[in-house]
């Protein structure tokens, strides 16, 4: 794909690209917005280096892609900015958010379209984030398995997200959502099919017996984690990652203890997952 207002460098042929020539602290013009959007659709996750954004500028960038989502059961660190999810770890942390492969808040009835993470402090080593292409995960399954999955749904529940459940005790509006979504999801923009189950939130497949559901899900989880479907982003201070939750999963490496990692995330609202035969 040719771009006129930005430069796009792929991390791998399968997923991920760095974008250059954009200052996210400034409003995107129509052409630049469209090209960033197209790069996201083409690469599933895009990265920006050397950015300086205030909280309001971060939110403004996210709102260019849609209304902002408020996490249902995470702590709200800034009372004036409930849409800001603080991502932090230090010498006191025993766990961090996102240590399992997942798609953000897939337990919502209308899960987020995308997430935009801005890290201002990073450890001297470690702390990478891995991203996996769910189109490829689906495409590389055998035809009989694909046909079977097209008929199935999965239950997603926030009860599996223990990290936030124990962190948000001070919220009086806390919610623990759950939802049922198709195992194979059609992307509403690209029309492509991708797997939509994940270790972080998926409980079971209700059409199957418990042992059948457990076995099938474990097979899919292992398949999703295939290295050839992935890219790995090495963070630097003031970097931004913007991923499409509808077709990508991610995994945050917690391999930097006791060092500090800090940043903010905004999340763009999405729509109800659906499956439409190609």
Image (cartoon, rainbow, N blue to C red):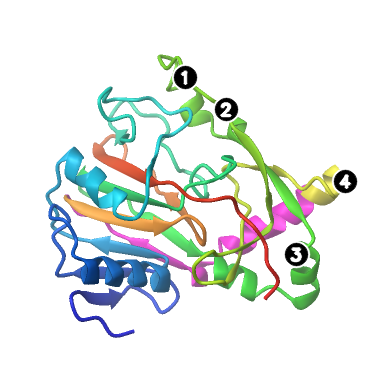
- In the rendered view, does 68 fall on the left or right side of 60? right
Q: Is residue 172 above or below residue 75?
A: above
Q: Residues within 10 Å of mark 3 (few under 14, many from 20)?
A: some
- Distance of label 1 from label 3 (alpha carbons): 36 Å
Give the residue pinned by disc 3: 150
Quadrant position of residue 141: bottom right
Q: Tag 3 or tag 1, which sits nearer the N-term? A: 3
Circle 3: element type: loop
Q: Is residue 233 magenta?
A: yes
List x then y, in percent, for residue 21.
Answer: 14, 70
Q: Residues within 10 Å of mark 4 (few under 14, many from 20)?
A: few
- Distance of label 2 from label 4 (alpha carbons): 25 Å
Where are the magenta residues, as a range?
A: 214-237
Between residue 228 and residue 23, name the one nearer to us.
23
Observer-side mark, 1 or 3, equals 1
Observer-side mark, 4 or 3, equals 3
> Which mark is drawn over residue 176?
2
Observer-side mark, 2 or 4, equals 2
């Amino acid at each position: 794909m040719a771009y006129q207002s930005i430069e796009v460098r792929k991390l791998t042929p399968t997923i991920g690209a760095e974008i250059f020539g954009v200052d996210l602290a400034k409003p995107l013009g129509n052409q630049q917005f469209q090209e960033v959007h197209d790069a996201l659709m083409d690469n599933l996750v895009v990265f920006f280096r050397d950015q300086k954004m205030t909280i309001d500028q971060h939110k403004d960038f996210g709102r260019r892609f849609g209304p902002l989502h408020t996490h249902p059961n995470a702590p709200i660190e800034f009372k004036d900015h409930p849409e800001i999810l603080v991502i932090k770890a230090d010498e006191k942390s025993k766990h961090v958010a996102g240590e399992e492969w997942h798609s953000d808040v897939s337990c919502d009835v209308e899960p987020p379209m995308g997430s935009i993470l801005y890290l201002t402090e990073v450890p001297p080593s470690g702390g990478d984030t891995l991203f996996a292409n769910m189109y490829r995960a689906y495409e590389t399954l055998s035809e009989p398995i694909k046909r079977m999955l097209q008929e199935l749904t999965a239950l997603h529940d926030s009860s599996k997200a223990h990290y936030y459940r124990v962190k948000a005790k001070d919220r009086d509006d806390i919610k623990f959502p759950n939802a049922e979504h198709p195992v194979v999801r059609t992307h509403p923009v690209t029309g492509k099919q991708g797997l939509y189950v994940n270790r972080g939130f998926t409980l079971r497949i209700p059409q199957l017996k418990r042992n059948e559901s457990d076995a099938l899900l474990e097979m899919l989880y292992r398949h999703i984690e295939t290295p050839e479907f992935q890219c790995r982003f090495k963070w630097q201070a003031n970097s931004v990652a913007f991923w499409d939750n509808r077709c990508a999963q991610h995994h945050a490496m917690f391999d930097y203890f006791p060092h500090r990692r800090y940043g903010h995330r905004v999340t763009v609202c999405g729509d109800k997952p659906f499956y439409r035969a190609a």
